[in-house]
Structures are given as structure tokens and as C-alpha cells.
Amino acid sequence: MTDTFDDTLFAFFTDLVYRHSGILLGERERGMLESRVGRRVRNLGLDSFWAYRERMRGNRGRDEIPALLDAVTINYTYFFREESQFAALSAEVFPEIVARKEAEGSDRVRVWSAGCSSGEEPYSVAIAFQEAVENAEWYDFQILATDINRRVLRTARNGSYPEDRLQQIPQEWHLKYLVRDAETPPGHLRISPEIRRRIRFRRFNLQSNADPLKDQFDVIFCRNVLMYFDEPAQQELLGRFRAILPRGAYLFVGESDELDTAPPGFTRIAFGVFRRG
Ligand SMILES: C[S@@+](CC[C@H](N)C(=O)[O-])C[C@H]1O[C@@H](n2cnc3c(N)ncnc32)[C@H](O)[C@@H]1O
């Protein structure tokens, strides 16, 4: 690189990321931003941050935005993250939902994993449904799983993971839910087709107000995502979730989101788990 990542460049890229994703990057993320933007600069064959900044202007710049967001979003996740929430999901939330559906004569259960990263969250939720609900296969159970990052969505769609990352899935479920097939790379295992078919992955920016926000859901997971947004953006998103969660539906947020009190219209039932009133 022929230049340094100075304050002007830092301000330019943090502003660009904020405008296109709502992600607020501060001084603490400066090193991360510099190294990840730097990697993108080198991959494009450019020799300076400044040249990349110039490319960001005009039409070519618009086409580059998704790649910049792929480079800078933080996608840390793992299977069955936040065990206590999965315990509440299996013991309370799913049984309550299917009992209600049965009373209504419906078999339709819809879940949205908003900010699903590389797929560990929606696959864990689908496995939990299969385990917690008697005759789970009789239900029209579908998960919409969305993220802004195209790279993690490719991993998620394929559903193959290195064997060490799969250790978070309880051992007794490995034979049931993990397979090896022609598309499984060496040292990996793949989520079984019965679980994969339950999930649709889509690129979706939570800061846009396009269609997933118009469906109705029984459960929304938006865990460890709100923390990247500022307060007005968090409140706006929570308000939009409220509008598409009918009475009795559930919202799960992450430990890092620090939502200690229930958002308006919700009652807290467990750590990070809220029920629509
Ligand atoms: C730290 S991961 C959390 C993954 C998972 N929900 C979990 O709790 O393990 C946050 C995810 O949110 C996604 N994200 C950030 N801003 C977003 C936005 N504006 N729209 C959609 N996804 C976004 C990131 O790409 C990333 O994959």
C-alpha cells in the first residue's frame, strides 16, 4: 500500500458502511477496517486506499458496495449459540406455538433468522424444531434466513462445515443430521437434506424496508446484530419486527445486543426472549 489509512479515509469508509448497512464503526474497529479494506484493495489489484476511494465514486462504486460490506461485516457465530435460549425454544416456545397452531387448525410455522451469518443459527433452530416437536415433519415449517453478506450466505446455502465447528451440535444428533455427500469438502460434514430443505437463504439488508418485513412470523431471531446499529436504527427495526409478529409470537435477541428490558409491545420470558403481547 502506498498510503496510510488516515482520518480522512477512516471517515470516508465508516460513513459509506453506515449509509449502506446501518453498521456503526468506531475508533475500536479502526484496525479491523484498515486491514479488511486493505485486503479488498489488494484483491482488486489497486495499490492505495486512495485509489479504492476514487473507485467508490460513481456507478462503478455502487457495484462495489456489496463487496465492501462482504469485507467488513463481522460474522462470528456458532451452532446452538446461547444454550439457555435454545432450552427455552425447545421447552416453551415451540410447544406453545404448535399447540396454538393445532387449536387454529393450521400447520404453518414461520421463522426468520435475520442476520443469519454462515447458517449455524437457522440450522440449529431447524434441528431444535425437529427434536422438540412430535411429528415435526408433518408441519409446514420454514425458516427464512437472511444476511447482507454474500460470502457467508454461500457457506450457509451449501451447509458444509469443518468437523471441529460441528462439535457444538450435541454428539447424539450427529448421525441423524450430518451427512457426507459429493458436495462435502474433505474434513467437513454437511447438514442433512431434511434439515436443509426447511431453510431459504436470501441476501437482505435489514436497513431496507423491502418484503421480508411484510410477512408474518411466529418467531424472529435477530441475535447479535442490533449491537452494530445506533439507537434510532435499533428502535426502528424493533418497531418493524413488532408489526410482523402477531400476538403470542416471539423475538429472540443476542447477549451482545444488551436489550435488558422488553421492547414496547413485548413481555420478557427468558434471557433475550420476548413474547408479543
Ligand atoms: C455477529 S453475526 C451474528 C450471527 C448470528 N445471528 C448469531 O447470533 O450467531 C452478525 C450478522 O449480521 C449481519 N448484518 C450486519 N448488518 C446487517 C444488515 N444491515 N442487514 C443484514 N444483515 C446484517 C452480518 O453480516 C453478520 O453476518
Image (cartoon, rainbow, N blue to C red):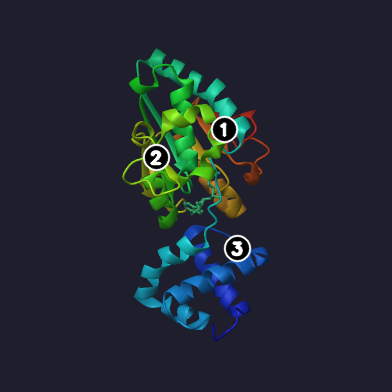
Is residue 148 in view? Answer: no
In depth, the one of 149 and 175 nearer the eye is 175
Question: Dot 2, how many residues are within 10 Å of its Cα: few (below 14), some (14-19), or many (20+)?
Answer: some
Q: Disc 1 on helix, strand or loop? A: loop
Indicate the position of residue 234 as horizontal and vertical percent values.
Answer: 57, 49
In depth, the one of 98 and 48 nearer the eye is 48
Q: Which residue is mark 1?
A: 265
Indicate the position of residue 233 as horizontal and vertical percent values.
Answer: 55, 52
From this view, report whether residue 220 is shown above or below residue 236: above
Tell me the quarter of the image containing the C terminus: top right
Q: Amino acid at mark 2?
A: Leu
Q: Residue, x 63% and y 78% (percent of image)? A: 7
* Upstream in sequence: badge 2 or badge 1: 2
* Upstream in sequence: badge 1 or badge 3: 3
In depth, the one of 114 and 151 nearer the eye is 151
Q: Residue furthest front?
A: 186
Q: Amino acid at mark 1?
A: Gly
How far separated are the C-alphas under marks 2 and 1?
23 Å
* Upstream in sequence: badge 2 or badge 3: 3
Q: Which residue is mark 2?
A: 144
Q: Tell me which corner region of the image, top left, top right, bottom left or bottom right, holds residue 261.
A: top right
Question: Dot 3, how many residues are within 10 Å of its Cα: few (below 14), some (14-19), or many (20+)?
Answer: many
Indicate the position of residue 151 as horizontal and vertical percent values.
Answer: 42, 57
Q: Left or right of 270: which side holds 107? A: left
How far separated are the C-alphas under marks 2 and 3?
27 Å
Q: Which residue is mark 3?
A: 25
Task: Specify whether tag 1 is near ligand 1 (CB below 8 Å).
Answer: no
